[in-house]
Image: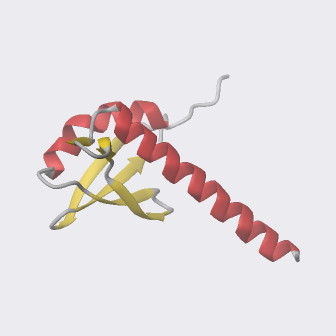
Amino acid sequence: MNTRNQRERMRQMATQRLVGRVQDILVGVGLTQADFNLGGGRTLHIPEVISVAEKPMRFTIRTLPDQIPDDFVKAAPRIAYALDVAEVHVDELGPSLIELRLVPKIRRSGG
């Protein structure tokens, strides 16, 4: 495998890890829904990260039924803290689609 393919593969793996982390955070802040049925027990539904873009870092998310963008706005400070960013902005893209836009912290060098 050449260097270019290796870099692309590593970038894809890092993106997959980041998507998993974001979905874990969504679980942690309570943006999930549980179903109970006799045959299968409990099923946990998680909003789905359907795309990731950089500069600025943002995630397109398919929300769950009955969720509204404001649910994510209310959780934004906790999501920002968990991702170690200054803020998370929530933009509505359409029915059942939102975008989480990350605002990085300004790092000041000591002196």
User: At 79% from the left edge and 75% from the top edge, which residue is drawn?
Assistant: 5
Vertically, is 68 above or below 98?
Answer: above
Instruction: Indicate left or right for 22 with 77 as reference.
Output: right
- Residue pushed farthest top? 111
Q: Which colour scheme appears in the figure?
A: secondary structure
Q: Is 18 left or right of 66, judged from the image as shown?
A: right
Q: Quarter-wise, where is residue 76 in the image?
A: top left
Image coordinates of residue 15 in percent, x first then y, are 58, 58
45 is higher (above) or lower (below) than 28: below
Image quadrant occupied by the C terminus: top right
**Residue situated in front as seen by the camera: 105 or 109:** 105
Q: Residue at x 80, y 75 (%)?
A: 4
Residue closest to the far right: 2
> In percent of the image, x 57 and y 31: which residue is there?
108
Left or right: residue 47 compared with residue 103:
left
The residue at the point 26 percent across, 36 percent down is 75
Tell me the quarter of the image containing the N terminus: bottom right
In the image, 34 versus 82, the foreground residue is 34
**Where's residue 90, x and y in %?**
26, 51
Most extreme residue toward the front is 39
Residue 12: x and y, percent?
Answer: 64, 64
Q: Position of residue 80 (x, y in %)?
A: 39, 36
Q: Where is 15 relative to 111, above or below?
A: below
Is 25 positioned to the left or the right of 35 in the image? right
Question: Which quarter of the picture shows residue 110?
Answer: top right
Query: How many marks overall?
Result: 0
